[in-house]
């Protein structure tokens, strides 16, 4: 008999849980889009987004999902025939590269596999090999949501500098922004791509491209369509230019509320909370792995994201569906790992708290019991200890 009554928990890596205050902020009539409150709200959103991303530079907002932000970023700095280097640590790097190819941009892939992060030395060598310095940008996922690998962005910057190469550093932070620590300016990223529906706790539909002065210089004089061009969107002369047309009024209200919540908590606390919850999940999975085949995809803790965890469990897909139907928690599907039915992912990004994490750990264990998957004991107690220590810190 199903025990899924009550509020369903969608624990996938985006869309993440939307806070009630965010949903409530959106529940209102459309405002005048020519003048008044909405104009001020958009200005404040741009400033606060930059605060979240750790940049003093510019941000362009698109009415799009993450794929739209990917395309926007590429369209501003590369033209057909140009080359980019792509650091591959999972399915999302491949997706971004495929998009570049479809735009006529040539891609050179550096493949780091599916269980370990970027080795900066190999980026440096690939750039040194480009003696004519034709590579326009290095594309990197801060977090690859398929593998749950996290990459060291400052180390990639250092590799580009060591090769004395002018390529821009373009970072996909769609999964990680407001979950894993990110400092765009301090780490030397030129472009940061993000979306509304993950750490930013707002419905899917807004894409963000943050860009440095160097990126702006690289864009200058390039032929970019009016719609994708990031210049009028970041520094509009008229309000409609922020969005190249009608503003996404209700997303703006929702995002304003979400940013207020991040400001109230503070980024250090937001990052700490995600770290504690990630640690609790990892410790639980390690405890289960003592008596079964379940295990984390990423062996080295330093390479793991705090936003999402990719887990190997033979027959994971049947357990995932059973938990969704019977226990009221839906996990993410296995992505970019074969066979995909033996993998699942836990989204632990955004609006989550201790009892959601501890409850979810219990749900996974119940799912393994129901599906007769052997596993070690004691995961719940270990996770509770980590959460208690995290809250006392
Ligand atoms: C979710 C995600 C994307 C794609 O975003 P969509 O909104 O689904 O288009 C791209 N990159 C990463 C790292 C993601 O997590």
Image: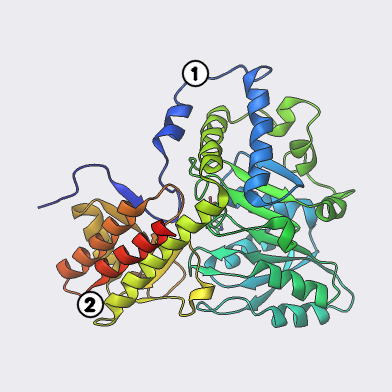
Q: Nearer the viewer, residue 19 or 170?
A: 19
Q: Can residue 347 be seen here? A: no
The answer to whether the residue bearing label 1 lies less than 8 angstroms from the nearest atom of ligand 1 is no
**Residue that mark 1 sits on:** 29
Of the image marks 2 and 1, the number of the one nearer the N terminus: 1
Relative vertical location of residue 342 with respect to residue 308 in this rendering, above or below? below
Q: Position of residue 60 (x, y in %)?
A: 71, 42
Q: Residue furthest front?
A: 392
Corner quadrant of residue 161: bottom right
- What residue is rendered at 42% in x and 68% in y? 310
Which one is in front in this view, the residue at disc 2 or the one at disc 1?
2
Q: Gap in Å between the C-alphas at discs 2 and 1?
A: 52 Å
The answer to whether the residue bearing label 2 lies less than 8 angstroms from the nearest atom of ligand 1 is no
Q: Position of residue 298 (x, y in %)?
A: 46, 76
- What residue is rendered at 28% in x and 46% in y? 8
Q: Position of residue 24 (x, y in %)?
A: 42, 28
Q: Secondary structure at mark 2?
A: loop
Residues packed near mark 2 inside 10 Å, few (<14), some (14 to 19) or many (20 plus)? many
Q: Is residue 341 left or right of residue 322?
A: right
Q: Position of residue 281 (x, y in %)?
A: 36, 66
Ligand 1 resides in the quarter of the picture at bottom right
Q: Quadrant of the C terminus?
A: bottom left
Q: Secondary structure at mark 1?
A: loop
Residues packed near mark 1 inside 10 Å, few (<14), some (14 to 19) or many (20 plus)? few
Q: Is residue 287 left or right of residue 140?
A: left
Relative vertical location of residue 151 with respect to residue 261 in this rendering, above or below? below
Corner quadrant of residue 313: bottom left
**Residue that mark 2 sits on:** 375
């Amino acid at each position: 008999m199903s025990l899924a009554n009550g509020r369903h928990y969608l624990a996938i890596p985006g869309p993440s849980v939307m806070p009630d205050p965010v949903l409530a902020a959106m529940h209102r009539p459309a405002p005048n889009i020519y003048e008044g409150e909405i104009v001020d709200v958009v200005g404040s959103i741009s400033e606060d987004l930059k605060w979240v991303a750790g940049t003093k530079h510019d941000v362009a907002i698109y009415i799009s999902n993450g794929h739209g932000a990917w395309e926007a970023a590429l369209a501003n700095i590369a033209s057909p025939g140009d080359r980019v280097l792509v650091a591959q640590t999972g399915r999302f790097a491949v997706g971004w590269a495929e998009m570049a190819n479809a735009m006529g941009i040539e891609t050179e892939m550096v493949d780091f596999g599916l269980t370990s992060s970027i080795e900066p030395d190999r980026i440096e060598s690939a750039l040194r090999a480009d003696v004519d310095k034709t590579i326009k940008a290095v594309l990197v996922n801060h977090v690859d949501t398929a593998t749950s690998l996290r990459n060291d962005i400052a180390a990639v910057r250092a590799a580009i500098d060591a090769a004395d190469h002018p390529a821009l550093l373009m970072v996909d932070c769609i999964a990680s922004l407001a979950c894993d620590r990110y400092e765009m300016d301090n780490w030397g990223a030129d472009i940061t791509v993000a979306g509304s529906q993950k750490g930013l706790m707002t419905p899917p539909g807004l894409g963000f491209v943050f860009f440095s002065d160097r990126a702006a210089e690289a864009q200058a004089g390039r032929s970019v369509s009016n719609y994708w061009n990031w210049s009028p969107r970041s520094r509009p002369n008229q309000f409609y230019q922020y969005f190249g047309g009608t503003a996404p009024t209700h997303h703006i209200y929702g995002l304003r509320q979400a940013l207020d919540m991040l400001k109230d908590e503070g980024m250090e606390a937001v990052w700490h909370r995600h770290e504690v919850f990630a640690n609790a999940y990892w410790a639980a999975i390690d405890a289960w792995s003592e008596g079964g085949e379940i295990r984390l995809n990423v062996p080295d803790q330093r390479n793991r994201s705090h936003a999402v965890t990719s887990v190997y469990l033979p027959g994971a897909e049947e357990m995932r569906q059973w938990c969704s139907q019977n226990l009221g928690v839906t996990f993410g599907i296995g992505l970019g790992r074969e066979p995909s039915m033996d993998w699942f992912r836990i989204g632990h990004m955004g609006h989550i708290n201790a009892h959601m994490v501890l409850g979810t750990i219990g749900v996974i264990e119940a799912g393994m019991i129901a599906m007769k998957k052997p596993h070690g004991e004691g995961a719940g107690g270990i996770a509770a200890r980590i959460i208690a220590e995290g809250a006392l810190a």
